[in-house]
Image (cartoon, rainbow, N blue to C red):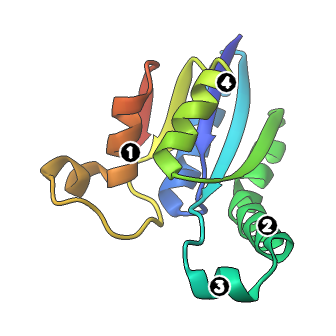
Amino acid sequence: MSCVLIPVDGSDNSMRAVDAACRQVAYGQPVTVHLLNVQPPITSAIVRDHLSQDLIDKFYQQLGETALESARTRLRDADIAYTSHVEVGDVAQTIARFVRDLYCDQVIMGTRGLGSGGVGAISSLLMGSIATKVLHLVEVPVTFVK
């Protein structure tokens, strides 16, 4: 059975990645699906000085759950079992860690999501800086969905 990781940020492109995984299952390929939402850490000292870590953690979890909601609904509607995860950290590094830790065979992800900023390289303009980083960090096939 194939193990697929789908990073989900709530964007249309990440939802198309979920749809692509649903099509794989529809074609008769047995798949274990892991949905992953990664929240970038809050680095503002002002926020950290005025909010407890527990409140910040609840905020991360709430944002992650909201981003995962549509993906979960699509997989449930397609009768596909999944496990979902919300993590905090560097997005590309966290995706790569999950690929290793869960022994994933494939990553299916959108080419551009809701991330901000970016590096000036042509590849990041075409695919998105997170997608570009993931491609370089993992040693499994990565399917980009536009």
Tell which of 50 and 117 is nearer to you. 50
Q: Earlier in the sequence, mark 4 or mark 3?
A: 3
**Element type at mark 3:** helix
The tag earlier along the polypeptide, 4 or 1, is: 4
Q: Position of residue 70 (x, y in %)?
A: 72, 59
Q: Locate the N terminus by quadrant.
A: top right
Q: Nearer the viewer, mark 1 or mark 3?
A: 3
Q: Which residue is mark 4?
A: 101
Sort mark 3 into few (<14), some (14-19) or many (20+) by Cα contacts within 10 Å: few
Q: Going 79% across and 64% down the picture, which residue do you hit?
A: 61
- Pointer 2 local density, CA inside 10 Å: few below 14, some 14–19, many at least 20: some
Q: Which residue is labeled 2 in the image?
A: 57
Q: Is residue 23 visible?
A: no
Q: CA distance from mark 1 to mark 3?
A: 29 Å
Please name the residue that numbered disc 1 is placed on: 131
Which is more N-terminal, label 2 or label 1?
A: 2
Left/right placement of residue 42 relative to residue 111 reads: right
Return the residue at label 3: 47
- Name the element at disc 2: helix
